[in-house]
Image: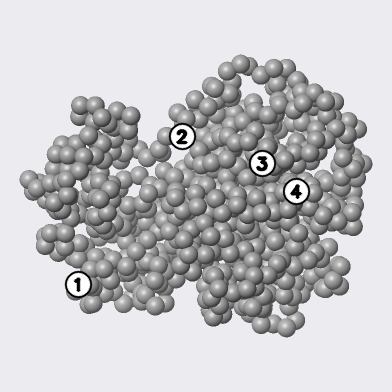
Amino acid sequence: MIIMSALPETVSGMAPSANRGDIMEEKIKKDDASRAPKSTKPHVIKPEVTEGIGGKVKVTIDGVELRVPYGTTILDAAKMINVHIPTLCHHEDLCVAGVCRVCVVEVEKQRTLQAACAYPITQPIVVHTSSPKVRRARRNIIDLLLSKHYGECYSCVRNNNCELQALAKEYGVDTYRFGHITERRYELDESSYALRRDMDKCILCRRCVRTCIDLQEVGVLEAINRGDETKIATFMDKPIAEVICINCGQCINRCPTGALRANDPSDEIWKAIDDPSKHVVIQTAPSPRAGIGEEFGLEPGIPLTFEMNTALRRCGFNKVFDTNFSADLTIIEEGTELILRLYNALVAKQPVALPQFTSCSPGWVKFIEHFYPEYLPHVSSAKSPQQMFGAVIKTYYAQINNIDPADIVTVALMPCSAKKYECNRPEMVDSGYKDIDYGLTTRELAQMIREAGIDLPNIPKSDFDDPFGTATGSGVIFGATGGVMEAALRTVYELVTGQIADPDDLAGQVKEIRGFDGIKYKELTLPEKLGPVPDLLKMNKDVPFSDWNWLSGATLKLAVAHGTANAKKVLEDIIAGGPLSQCHFIEFMACPGGCLGGGGQPIPTTPEIRKARAKAIYSEDQAYEIRKSHDNPAVVELYTKFLTDGPVGHTAHKLLHTSYTARGKYIV
């Protein structure tokens, strides 16, 4: 564990090493290569050398001749000329598998059919993608998959969004040529708060295995047994809740069928809505608003924030609140905690756990609990925005509206399946009640809206409800990787320097933390002349300083990581005493792309879809009149009327902060 009694030289105002940033940038680029094992990565000539001798290879696909970079797969070459080849095990986020064989094609002079997703083009070839032999083979494969596929499509959560169902339609399946099982072979695994596993719908594509091992580096799932007995299982075939699953739901997002799904509480929510004695409130996070349109046929990147507010009221929710409010609250609490850690390390010379890690991603929190429990002191004690909001609703909101907290049902619309687990953590009851009663994913809310007969894209817009209807652009960008860091900097930089920080100018200064690089690094130097300590911080009488002189000219070192495979790289670098061990603040998100790529978001997910959602989030940020968390009048009012001992004060610490559990990786 890195417990620092003093900070790196740059924080005491000394100049940073001349090439530290360059070294860090080079390291990140090197480390950010594909996680796929070398055996499953085709060798592709880099674009800058494809014009040399042997750089490009001729291929003829269905009579169309083209030249492609050496090592390009047949599948990728076919995409270049808009030739459709069906797939099941292939996914843009994952390494090559070639196990489902649905993508087989005929290559002249090859004895057998070849898997297009795994066949690298290294010499001139002629390919036929829809010959009679190919069509028969694909139909046989699909029929064989259906013969072991238990259940009926109309009762499946993936009905009309199932890749196997779509292929069956594409290839004219109208009968079960090889039979169809009518009884379950496997028991449903409903042990987890976050997800459910139905192995009778599994087609053994191993996408979940590759997601868990290669994309996230958690390794909960693997194929066991051989031949007809093969199945996807956990360690010793234990229930998913009893192993080291972090509940991120990335396996759900990449499953082509209904074998994996989130644990849906919508029936319980409908029951609460229909109960006149219950006051049902919902908070909505920014990422679902950027993605829910995809569930209604819109292109990715079209937000439906205010249409969704109207839909939620029509569904019967009593109040619709904006999670961006509590995101702003999180920035104040987490930022104050960071400042206090820096002061204690620099001035008070106390042992302090630095860098400070963010805590708003529950998948990341569970990852560190299992894999690096000795680093839990580095994790901010601030709850996530979801949980902070729940605690405020069942205390302050209940009080000012004279409602018994026992009669309030709190629902959180989140992009994340791990949020379902988070709201059921035993730590999350500081209000005296369960802070959040139900976590609802984007997909699940879309189903509720359809069930209510609402055409979401074509209904009137409406605003959020008071007293938590006012939010800022800082809360919005929480949904994208780097957003929490940028939001924190907007507030901390302005509060410390006393200078008005234009969000766009600041974004230009810290542009390195935006985007989808796996690990991002930035150094930010504060000016010599700093402002007065703001009144908001002075509310906390235990704040041990009255000026910012101790931060004059300091250089803050910051990092951002998304996806737990990248989180692992960061933590291993810290353990080794590498450049990232010198950071002061690191943002971690469990899901690739951040919350916008969460396990509860619309299916499918691809890098391009995630980029479109990010664009929508940053566009919403631009549209907000207030874009800095500390300028949110609703947050200021909350401190003035309720959290009167200020940020990280006694009341705030009781309701808005928590601790976590060192779990480790050993299973009893």
Task: Please tell me which of labels 3 and 2 falls first in the chain.
Answer: 2
Instruction: Give the residue at mark 3.
Output: 504
Name which of mark 2 and mark 4 comes first in the sequence: 2
The image position of residue 426, as x and y in percent, is: 68, 58
**Front: mark 3 or 4:** 3
In the rendered view, tell whether residue 634 sits above or below residue 645: below
How far across and how far down the image is residue 551, in percent? 79, 27
User: In the rendering, at what x and y percent does residue 519 appear?
Assistant: 53, 36
Going by the numbered disc 4, the residue's amino acid type is Ser
User: For the residue marked with disc 1, what is the amino acid?
Assistant: Phe
Where is residue 96? Give x, y as percent. 31, 45
Mark nearest the camera among 2 and 4 is 4
* Picture disc at residue 629: 4
Nearer to us: label 1 or label 4: 4
- On screen, residue 100 versus residue 398, left or right, reads left
Helix, strand or loop at disc 1? loop
Can you tell which mark lies on residue 178?
Answer: 1
